[in-house]
Image (cartoon, rainbow, N blue to C red):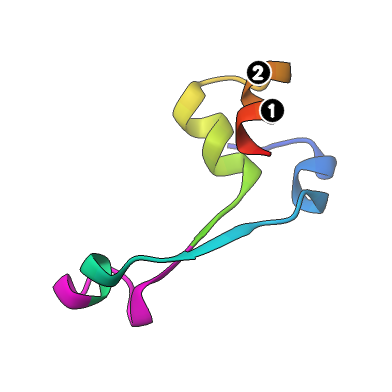
Amino acid sequence: MTFPAFFAQVPSITLRDRLADFLGAAAGGLIEYRYADAVRLAGHSCPTVAGSYL
């Protein structure tokens, strides 16, 4: 799946999930989300998806 180049310019969101760390699902419990992840989950990119990501 390819995305427009500007998707890579959107800052990522990093969060710490202690349960994910405990269960071994994420190293150190750190999970990084990118705008492309939000688009994949929504199935499209629109102002509402962008606003929700922000």
Categorize mark 2 by other alpha carbons within 10 Å: few (<14), some (14-19), many (20+).
Answer: few
Tell me where residue 50 appears, x and y as whole percent: 69, 29
Q: Residue at x 65, y 18 (%)?
A: 48
4 over 46 or under it: above or below: below
Residue 46 on the magenta segment: no
Q: Name the residue under label 1.
A: 51
Q: Element type at marker 1?
A: helix
Categorize mark 1 by other alpha carbons within 10 Å: few (<14), some (14-19), many (20+).
Answer: few
Residue 3, image quadrant: top right
Question: Which segment is the magenta one?
Answer: 22-31
Image quadrant containing the C terminus: top right
Q: Which residue is drawn at 61% across and 29% down?
A: 52
Look at label 2 and name its amino acid.
Thr
Tell me where residue 30 appears, x and y as whole percent: 43, 72
Any mark on residue 48, and which?
2
- The furthest residue to the bottom: 28
